[in-house]
């Protein structure tokens, strides 16, 4: 199963895994599942760090790569098709990062690990 971590799920996994549900932890720890982190989350983490909204122990470019390696998380590029898909989604949710994650999940049939219940309104499979 391919699991796409949303930004909060990735941050919590790396810094405070107790915030994850038992179900999410079970799926993440299952070696048969592949974990992915979108470039949308990389951008969101980097922006939040640069404006002081997210404290990290080191620069995002180092922390994200290190944590991705530790947790065996694949970094997922955003294609133009994913960008176009994000603009075709209903405007239930306006967060551009979440919209890109939803588009990626739809285009590539990923399950999204997220606490954000609004994702369900886009008919993507959620694990939480």
Image (cartoon, rainbow, N blue to C red):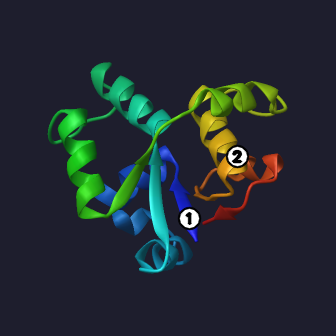
Q: Is residue 18 above or below residue 121?
A: below
Horizontal side of residue 25 vs 60, given as left or right? right
Q: Which residue is mark 1?
A: 2
Q: Residue at x 23, y 62 (%)?
A: 70
Residue nearest the viewer, comparing 80 with 72:
80
Mark 1 residue crowding within 10 angstroms, few (<14) / some (14–19) / many (20+):
some
Horizontal side of residue 66 vs 9, given as left or right? left
Q: Which residue is mark 2?
A: 107
Q: Is residue 92 above or below residue 71?
A: above
Horizontal side of residue 55 vs 40, given as left or right? left
Horizontal side of residue 7 vs 82, given as left or right? left
Give me the C-alpha separation between circle 2 and circle 1: 12 Å
SS of the residue at dot 1? Answer: strand
Residue 123: percent from left, percent from top: 81, 53
Residue 57: percent from left, percent from top: 15, 42
Q: Quadrant of residue 47?
A: top left
Residue 16's label in the rendered image is none
Mark 2 residue crowding within 10 angstroms, few (<14) / some (14–19) / many (20+):
few
Q: Residue at x 82, y 48 (%)?
A: 121
Q: Quadrant of the C terminus?
A: bottom right
Q: Is residue 80 above or below residue 58?
A: above
SS of the residue at dot 2? Answer: helix
Q: Earlier in the sequence, mark 2 or mark 1?
A: 1
């Amino acid at each position: 199963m391919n699991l796409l971590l949303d930004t909060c799920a990735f941050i919590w996994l790396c810094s405070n895994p107790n915030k994850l549900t038992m179900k999410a932890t079970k799926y993440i720890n299952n070696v048969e599942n592949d974990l992915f982190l979108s470039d949308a989350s990389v951008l969101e983490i980097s922006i939040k760090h640069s404006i002081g909204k997210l404290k990290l122990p080191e620069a995002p470019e180092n922390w994200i790569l290190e944590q991705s390696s530790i947790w065996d998380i694949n970094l997922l590029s955003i294609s133009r098709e994913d960008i176009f898909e994000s603009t075709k989604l209903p405007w239930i949710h306006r967060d551009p990062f979440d919209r890109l994650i939803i588009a990626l999940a739809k285009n590539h049939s990923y399950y999204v690990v997220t606490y954000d219940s609004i994702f369900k309104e886009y008919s993507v499979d959620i694990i939480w």
